[in-house]
Amino acid sequence: MADSLWNYLNSNQFQSIYDCFGVFKSDCNNPFYHITDLCNRGGCILSGIFSVGEVKSLATLSEKIHGYGSVIGFMCLTFAPLFVGIYSYKINNIKFFYFSIGCFILAILCFSCFVMGDKPNAKNTFLAFEGLWQRLSLLFMYLPLGCLILLKKINC
């Protein structure tokens, strides 16, 4: 239940980024809109509705929907710092551009460690800390978005 509530709140967070703060227009030509929309639907809403089992198997339909939805959501959210970097480059904020691209690279690295941590060869290595890698990748995915919101609020 708490996981479903968190996923619902997470999906509303993205909506507030481009609705309440006016950071991005939610039109059909905006690639950032499509990325956050896929992340909302896949990683937040579908994963919140369909629960996962105790073990990491895709035996039931609910587990399959949860697993594939999470993959779609995570993959889309990984590219959010890249699009924030492109946006900051277009508005000539070069420092924030480098910051966003750095977060994108770190998010890719941490996400790769998160995926590799599930493999049998990664047992008893630093890659085995899947929770750490997942949280670090999410930190680097969300950090440019949060900073962008703060920069927009300060400049207004």
Image (cartoon, rainbow, N blue to C red):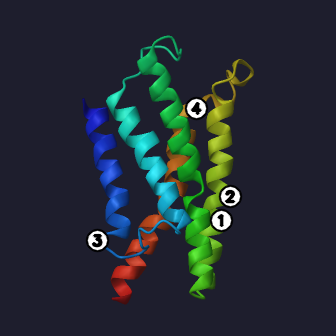
Q: Residue 11 or 130: which is nearer the viewer?
A: 11
Residue occupying image coordinates x 39% and y 81%: 152
Q: Residue at x 60, y 72 (%)?
A: 85
Q: Which residue is mark 1?
A: 102
In this image, 120 relative to 82: left or right?
Answer: right
- First along the sequence among labels 2 and 4: 2
How many C-alpha atoms fall within 10 Å of the one at disc 2: few (<14), some, or many (≥20)?
A: some
Q: On residue 105, which mark appears?
A: 2
Q: Position of residue 122 (x, y in %)?
A: 71, 25
Q: Amino acid at mark 1?
A: Gly
Mark 3 and mark 2 lie on one chain; the one further toward the N terminus is 3
Label 2 vs label 4: CA separation? 20 Å
Along the line of sight, which residue is nearer the eye, 12 or 120?
Answer: 12
Classify residue 47 by image quadrant: top left
Q: Is residue 44 above or below residue 79?
A: above
Dot 1 lies on which element? helix
* Residue named by callout 4: 129
Q: Are marks 2 and 1 in contact (CB under 8 Å)?
A: yes
* Distance CA(mark 1)–CA(mark 3): 27 Å
Query: How far, Cα to Cα, is label 2 from label 1?
Result: 5 Å
Furthest-top residue in view? 59
Q: Earlier in the sequence, mark 4 or mark 3?
A: 3
CB-based contact (under 8 Å), mark 2 and mark 4: no
In the picture shown, does residue 30 fall above or below 114? below
Residue 131: mark in rendering:
none
Q: Amino acid at mark 4?
A: Phe
